[in-house]
Amino acid sequence: MSDQVVTRFAPSPTGFLHIGGARTALFNWLYARRHGGRMLLRIEDTDRERSTDAAIGAILDGLDWLGLDWDGDVVYQFSRVARHREVAESLLASGGAYHCYASQQELEEMRESARRDGRPLRYDGRWRDRDPADAPPGVKPVIRLRAQSEGETVVQDHVQGRVVWQNKDLDDLVLLRSDGTPTYMLAVVVDDHDMAVTHVIRGDDHLTNAARQSQIYRALGWRAPEWSHVPLIHGADGAKLSKRHGALGVDAYRDLGYLPAALRNYLVRLGWSHGNQEIFSDEEMVAAFDLGQIGRSPARFDVAKLESLNGHYLRQAPDAELVCRLETLLPVLGPARGLGTSFTPEVRRRLEASMAGLKERAKTLIELLDSAYYLHASAPLTLDAKAAALLDEAARARLASLLPILEVVAEWRAPELEAAIRSFAETAGTKLGQVAQPLRAALTGRTTSPPLFDVMEVLGRTESLARLRAQVENGADA
């Protein structure tokens, strides 16, 4: 085994990239980067009925969006079936495995007997030492591992500690099915060995598999990798994360308007800690990540905490980057909001000019896009209920009186606009808010926005006056 650290992420392509799988990929990526090693990607597509090209695409897209790059080419497990079969045959030749001719009926009788007696469901080893000459005619055998039946199998796990199984409780598992296809247990061991994987970091639902795979390594005379079995992610109620807890796939969080940096930061803190630090740059994560700091208890997924963290990353992100990210959401979100699949140059300019104020209030890109409605809407705007209530008859009358003053403002900049509107309010003997609030409603269709005078400057003279005239002429229901 190489001295270089080699990890691997090995998803089954039967659906989207699950949020738990994304965390596993992140932990593997961080550990490899921390130690100057490599993270490999293996698609475990041997289940031909459930594996799909769409799922493979979703996994690759999800990793790419999260910013988790892998080293080398993607390895597809199904393409290595001949190698898996070769290893099984070598074990057969060395006596480390044997042909088993037990029928399905016999196997079912074994299971039923074990259930009746309250014993674990295990193969009873009936063909372990029988002469193949006794095999019933026409039966295609499976190849089973001749596992050690005495002593114990020990796994030294970086997360779980020392875990021990009694070998009498581990049966002779199938390596090669009767149709010549390898089982998951064999394929994983052969692939990890051939890919020179030094550290296997995966969910603790695979912990028992580590015992069985350790026996295969021993039978082959190969050195097993170092193991780290990470507790699964649970929902806020403590139950295993499921659809009822909300979105499960990375693609859903992308479409819900989360930033990849925020999701990376959130996932790294699910089950791993580094003092009281909550916010990490990628460089800080890589420098700090250590397997020994992963807890043994399941982590709880808290959407509110993720949302809050995402808000932090939105505020820190460059304005132009956020505009680009908003644009990537348009194919999904644009039509329902009266937008196309891209921004016009004028809308893009307005967004960049307004982003500093917009991002202070938003927690997701969707909230950001919705709060920027006024930047891409056409007159007359659709008002929300609160804005419509503000634009009563008296408010529209004030706006009608304000229009001639705004039409002659020399320079359409925030300071000049503020001075003109303050002067109007003083002359009219009214509070600034009684002018500014309906003005905001008429210009944005909402009661909250970035600073009003900045909004007017960004919209420009022509668009601002057009929106005001539309509300004055058409009334609050326009």
Image (cartoon, helix red, strand yellow):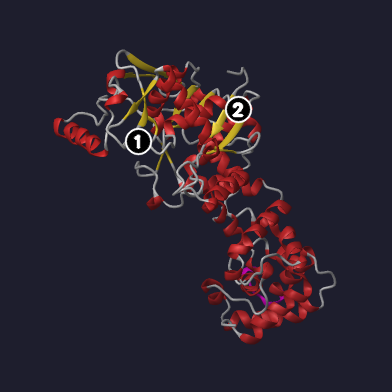
- Residue 211, above or below 266: above
User: Residue 351: x, y in percent?
Assistant: 71, 61
Q: Position of residue 411 (x, y in %)?
A: 84, 69
Task: Spot the residue most to the top.
Answer: 151
Local crowd at mark 2 within 10 Å, few (<14), some, or many (≥20)?
many
SS class of the residue under badge 1? loop
Which segment did they paint magenta? 427-433
The residue to which callout 2 is attached is 32
Q: Is residue 431 magenta?
A: yes
Image position of 262 with respect to 246: above or below: above
Residue located at (64% from left, 83% from top): 397
Q: Quadrant of the C terminus?
A: bottom right
Q: Quadrant of residue 107?
A: top left
Location of residue 316 with respect to 418 vertically, above or below = above
Based on the picture, tell me whether residue 69 belongs to the magenta stretch.
no
Q: Is residue 86 left or right of residue 296?
A: right
The location of residue 327, given as percent across then percent down, is 67, 59
